[in-house]
Image (tube, helix red, strand yellow):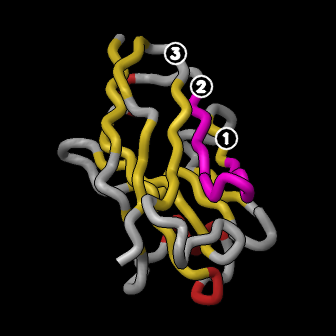
Amino acid sequence: QLPLVESGGGSVQSGGSLTLSCAAAAVTGFSVDSFAVGWFRQAPGKEREGVSCIDGKSENTYYADSVRGRFTISKDNAKNTVYLQMNDLTVEDTGVYYCEAVIQTLIHTAQDMCLKSHALSYTGPGTQVTVSS
């Protein structure tokens, strides 16, 4: 099991910003160059949504329509960390945010990472984001 740890969640007012981080608790076996990584969110009563994903090799990205233009996914190879910069947050962005990693050889595109189910994936415990009006 490859443990991933999300951090950076919190409570903000509408229009505010947060930056989420996703890192492996143990360095062994995890490299952002070798894995496609995505941010997913789960809100009460809603389906799990692929928010943004990044390809490990090409660094191509995908954004859900609901966040495009407001969120930015990036990665720091030296720190083995993937970030999600979230700006202009709205109450609809409230939810638990998870990062998920899949070995790059199993992923064709960042869009695939976000929109398809993956049998062999690693997911962290999640971090809560709460946006109030």
- Dot 3 falls on a residue whose secondary structure is loop
- Which residue position holds label 2? 87
Answer with left or right where residue 120 lies relative to residue 111.
left
- Dot 1 falls on a residue whose secondary structure is strand
- Dot 2 falls on a residue whose secondary structure is loop
Image spot of residue 89 (x, y percent): 50, 24
Image spot of residue 97 (x, y percent): 38, 46
Between the residue at mark 1 and the residue at mark 2, the CA separation in whole angstroms equals: 9 Å
Image spot of residue 25 (x, y percent): 43, 59
Image spot of residue 96 (x, y percent): 31, 43
Q: Residue at x 71, y 58 (%)?
A: 61
Answer with left or right where residue 74 lies relative to residue 99.
right
- Which residue position holds label 3? 16
- Which residue position holds label 1? 72
Q: Which residues are magenta?
A: 74-86
Sequence-earlier tag: 2 or 3: 3
